[in-house]
Every structure is written in structure tokens, then in C-alpha cells.
Image: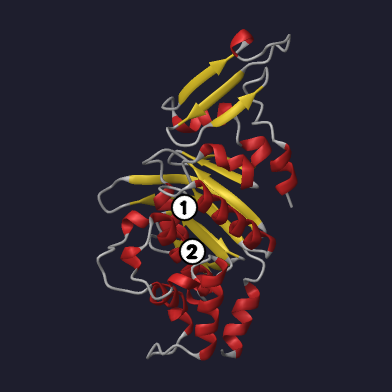
């Protein structure tokens, strides 16, 4: 690795992502997001929450440099996204349904793709590349499946393969697009545990999710989006019933329990459950602005 590359790597060691008043208008005239602003730093797991068509995918594409804002800007440690991408600082885990599973490729080959940006022109893996791939497969628990065809894996195993590819890239910023869709509880818990480890190692983890119920359990920060950023901040103060209702524009299902339906005592508080048909978020208390009360397990998992 060149001296210049080492300098760039150390520049992004403590990532700070700023989206400043970004507007993206496509060639057909459709404005996907407008005046979107937020900033997040390394050592954070941040949930990006919004309904389908709210601009989550466009925001991801903007952060990855695939689309350019017509107004505003996106920077990482005061550098352009283009500079960060040249150093492979930003890694992406796609939705599995976006992948052609008929393409004949081994699990280990998919993970090795994360090293391509570090290789020379001929893309011949070095001993170090193989070591990094081995470590990535070990972290996601897929060493025994390394020689299997990717199309033969279960949904959860495919998710973990692409997560391993992102780990092999050694990026400090990790974008995950709906990582919990189509996976079982065991796989979801394994992914969450790994994301917590990455947070503790100083990574900036941005997770696009519909899984409302899991957000308070493992996310430190929340961005709520509906074509613009409606709210951004710590989960405890931002992930509220009022903010979610504003973000989803009335499309959430509501279930309210109170009185004898909920309590066998004199406790007058009500329980409100809201969901977009995935895992529900629960709000408990008099005030609709009160965020979900943390369980003891959630408190113990906080850094």
C-alpha cells in the first residue's frame, strides 16, 4: 500500500458523515429527496426509517456516489464522497432480492470481491487478501460454506455472505439495505451482535430497515425520512410515536390496549402498538411523545 493510501486510510479512521441540504432530481424530473440534512459519526449504529418510496434508496445511492445531488452536498471527514470511494471507505450490503442467484460463483469468491479495490490491475489476490477473506467468513460464521455456490444458500446465509464481503473491504462506513428482511430470528440476532461489535470498533453503521421493533434494541441514532429528513437524533428522543406517525403518513397499523384489556390492577397507562406489517414498535405511557420504554436487556446491551 502506498504512503498516499495510508494517509487517506488514517484520514477516515474516525468517520464523520455529513449530508448537507441534499436534493436529488433524476433525469425524468422526479425529485426523490429534497433539502435532506443530517450528520453521524463513527461508533454509531444509525437506523434509516421510512416507508417504501420515501427516498431511502436514493439517499444510499447518494452516499455511495452513484447519484449526484442537484443541490447540497455529502462529505465524509470534510472530503468529497468521491475521495472516500477511491479509498474503499464505504461498504454496501444490498438487499438479497437485488442479486442474480443463478450466476455460478462460490461464497469465498463473493467475499473476495470486497478486496478488488485493494488489488492491482490484474486483480490477483495476495496472501493478505486471502487472510482477510478468511477472517470475514469466520466473523459471520460461514467458513464451512466457503466452497458452496452462493445460489444454494438460505436467505440468512446469503445476507451473511454479503456482510462478509463488506467486512473484507475494510471500510469504516457500512451501509446495510434491509438486512433483516427474510431472515430468521437466530440470523437477525447474529447480525445485530456483529453490528454492535463493529460499532465498538469505531465503524459508522447505517441500516435501512422497516423492522420498527428492533430499532430501539440496537440503534443509537435514528434518521426518519419521507423524501426529506423529518427527524434525526438519538433513538431515545427521536424514535417516538409522533415522529413515526408523521414519517409514515398514516399508513401504520395502530393497536391500543388500556384498562382491563391490559392491566389487572389500577395502573391507568395504555399500551400502543404500531407496525408497518413487520416487527412492531411498542409505546407505553400516558404521553404519545414518549419513546418505547427500554427493557433491562436493552439497557444491558448499551455501550
The image shows residue 161 at horizontal and vertical percentages of: 44, 65
- Which type of secondary structure does the marked residue at label 1 adopt? loop
User: Disc 1 to disc 2, how far (Cα)?
Assistant: 9 Å
> Which residue position holds label 2?
163
Who's the residue at 62% across and 66% down the image?
Answer: 77
Residue 216 versus residue 139 in the image, above or below: above
> Which residue position holds label 1?
179
Q: Nearer the viewer, residue 87 or 68?
A: 87
Left or right, residue 160 beside residue 12: left
Left or right, residue 27 beside residue 294: left
Residue that sits furthest to the front in the current view: 144
- Which type of secondary structure does the marked residue at label 2 adopt? helix
Residue density around tag 1, few if under 14, some if 14–19, many if 20 or more, within 10 Å = many
Looking at marks 1 and 2 on the same chain, the residue that comes earlier in the sequence is marked by: 2
The image shows residue 210 at horizontal and vertical percentages of: 46, 41
Contact between marks 1 and 2 (CB within 8 A): the answer is yes
Residue 132 versus residue 96 in the image, above or below: below
The answer to which quarter of the image holds residue 263 is top right
Q: Nearer the viewer, residue 247 or 21?
A: 247
The answer to which quarter of the image holds residue 278 is top left
Amino acid at each position: 500500500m502506498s504512503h498516499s493510501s495510508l494517509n487517506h486510510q488514517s484520514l477516515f479512521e474516525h468517520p464523520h458523515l455529513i449530508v448537507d441540504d441534499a436534493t436529488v432530481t433524476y433525469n425524468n424530473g422526479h425529485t426523490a429527496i429534497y433539502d435532506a440534512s443530517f450528520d453521524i459519526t463513527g461508533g454509531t449504529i444509525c437506523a434509516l426509517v421510512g416507508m417504501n418510496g420515501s427516498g431511502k434508496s436514493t439517499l444510499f445511492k447518494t452516499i455511495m456516489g452513484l447519484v449526484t445531488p442537484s443541490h447540497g452536498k455529502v462529505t465524509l471527514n470534510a472530503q468529497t464522497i468521491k475521495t472516500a470511494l477511491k479509498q474503499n471507505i464505504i461498504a454496501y450490503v444490498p438487499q438479497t432480492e437485488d442479486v442474480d442467484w443463478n450466476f455460478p460463483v462460490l461464497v469465498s469468491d463473493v467475499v473476495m470481491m470486497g478486496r478488488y479495490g485493494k488489488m492491482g490491475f490484474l486483480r490477483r489476490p495476495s496472501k493478505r487478501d486471502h487472510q482477510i477473506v478468511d477472517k470475514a467468513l469466520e466473523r459471520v460464521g460461514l467458513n464451512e460454506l466457503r466452497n458452496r455456490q452462493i445460489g444454494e444458500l438460505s436467505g440468512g446465509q446469503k445476507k451473511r455472505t454479503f456482510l462478509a464481503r463488506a467486512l473484507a473491504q475494510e471500510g469504516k462506513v457500512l451501509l446495510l439495505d434491509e438486512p433483516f428482511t427474510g431472515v430468521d430470528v437466530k440470523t437477525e440476532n447474529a447480525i445485530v451482535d456483529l453490528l454492535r461489535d463493529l460499532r465498538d470498533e469505531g465503524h459508522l453503521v447505517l441500516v435501512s430497515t422497516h423492522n420498527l421493533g428492533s430499532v430501539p434494541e440496537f440503534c443509537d441514532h435514528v434518521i426518519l425520512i419521507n423524501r426529506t429528513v423529518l427527524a434525526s437524533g438519538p433513538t431515545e428522543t427521536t424514535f417516538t410515536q409522533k415522529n413515526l406517525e408523521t414519517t409514515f403518513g398514516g399508513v401504520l397499523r395502530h393497536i391500543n390496549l388500556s384498562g382491563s384489556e391490559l392491566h389487572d390492577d389500577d395502573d391507568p397507562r395504555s399500551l400502543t402498538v404500531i407496525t408497518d406489517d413487520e416487527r412492531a414498535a411498542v409505546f407505553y405511557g400516558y404521553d404519545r411523545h414518549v419513546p418505547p420504554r427500554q427493557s433491562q436487556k436493552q439497557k444491558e446491551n448499551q455501550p
